[in-house]
Amino acid sequence: MVTTSSKRVDLQFGIECLVCIGLTILFHFLQVSYLSSSGLFIWTLVGGLTCWLIWLTNFWRARNTFRSVIKVSLKLVSYALYSLVLIMVVNALLAIVWQGTHFWAQGLLSLGTILIIGLSLPGFFKLVVNETNPILRMVSIFFYYLGFGLFPQSLGFGNHYVNDYGAPYWLAFISATLLVIYAMVHWGYQLPQLKFNHHLNYWWLALLVIPRFLVMGFSAGSWSRFFSLPLQIRLVIPNNSLTTATIYAVFTIVTVCFKEELIFRYLFLAQILNAVKGSVRTRILKTTLITATLFAAWHLHHIFYQPFTTTCLQILAAFGMGVVFAIIYLYTGTIWVTVIMHSIFDLFSVDMAGSVTPFVSQPTSFLVEFILITTTAQVAIGLIAIYTMKTGPFEQTIRANQRKQVLRRPALNRLEN
């Protein structure tokens, strides 16, 4: 059964797609803003058309494999390009208003941010919330969070742009975060909890946590510097200004560390844990390896501004980090331990040999050896922990992850039908 509110969302989404397609074509021929570029025009037009086709497929059922493949393909393109469509159209509107009125630039950019957030809601409910396939759910929520959490960086007209630390950026990031958490709750998953699971073995937890901090030594530059005592722990900041350091630290913790932990240890891990089958230890192992692989693959985007070999090392290091972080989350039942650890790792270094991270240059023999050794050690500790620790805390995480799924399943089945 399709509810009245669902029909209304579908109608709003369909109208929005048609309006965006029309404006995209109009602004391109008028040579307005970014849409004057043939490349961006084509991508924006393709995004609008695929979103409209997804809306149109409500009028026919995917009764065979061919139609199912087409529908899934359209969804994947829509997930990837939906944010681009709205960003380009709103950018063009901002440019027209600015040229005609010279309205206060930063205020106009803030209004543009609010407009994009509002316009994204029909697509959010249509493409994300109403998705029922587990894999497509993860893909849709990932693209939505990235696209609409970071879009202010793409807003601009004339010589005016959104500051990385400005209010529009925070407004977009917070709104996107709340919306993806809403989607998870709607699908039946619990909110990230603050308290630990019961009956934890804190010696095991310390064994998982403490070696992770030693991994910060990748920045030492040599084994002699790494083993020199006492180790010098330094804050990684752009300069020595207290204000700049504070802003940089908050920005890094919230928009990098928290965001990545929310994606890989909540949005992804909770759904994967609910999908995999087997004994408790088997489910924990599968979930850990899958999320660690996804977390490692996420770091592939660094290849555009780092050497290939160094990026490969970073991906390997991220895999080891993902293994340990997944186990810590599954054991404690909370992402906040990994958020804190991730923040410390990104903000501090051990006796840093240079002024920039060693990942931006060709790898040294020390970096290669250090990453290989520490990643192997982390994976080994993780596997030992999975097959040695008592399963009680893990079972509590699984139960908490499934409880609302069971309670909400009848309602979800009615929605799907």
Image (cartoon, rainbow, N blue to C red):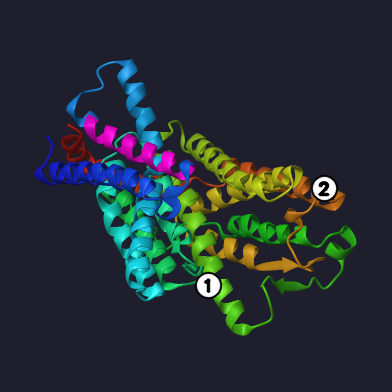
**Location of residue 154 in the rendering, given as x and y in whole percent from the top left corner:** 46, 58
Q: Secondary structure at mark 1?
A: helix
The residue at which mark 2 appears reads as 369
Question: What residue lies at 55% left-to-right and 48% top-to-bottom?
Answer: 327
**Location of residue 389 in the rendering, given as x and y in whole percent from the top left corner:** 56, 47
Q: Secondary structure at mark 2?
A: helix
The disc placed on residue 250 is 1
The type of residue carrying mark 1 is Val
Quadrant of residue 116 in the image? bottom left
Bin the neighbour count of mark 2 within 10 Å (Cα to Cα): few under 14, some 14-19, many 20 and up: few
Question: What residue lies at 90% left-to-right and 62% top-to-bottom?
Answer: 224
Labels 1 and 2 touching (C-beta < 8 A): no
**Location of residue 256 in the rendering, given as x and y in whole percent from the top left corner:** 54, 60
Residue 314 located left or right of residue 24 = right
The disc placed on residue 281 is none
Check the picture and name the quadrant holding the N terminus.
top left
The residue range painted magenta reads 39-56
- Mainly helix, strand or loop, the magenta region? helix
Q: Is residue 273 visible?
A: no
Q: Is residue 98 visible?
A: yes
The type of residue carrying mark 2 is Glu
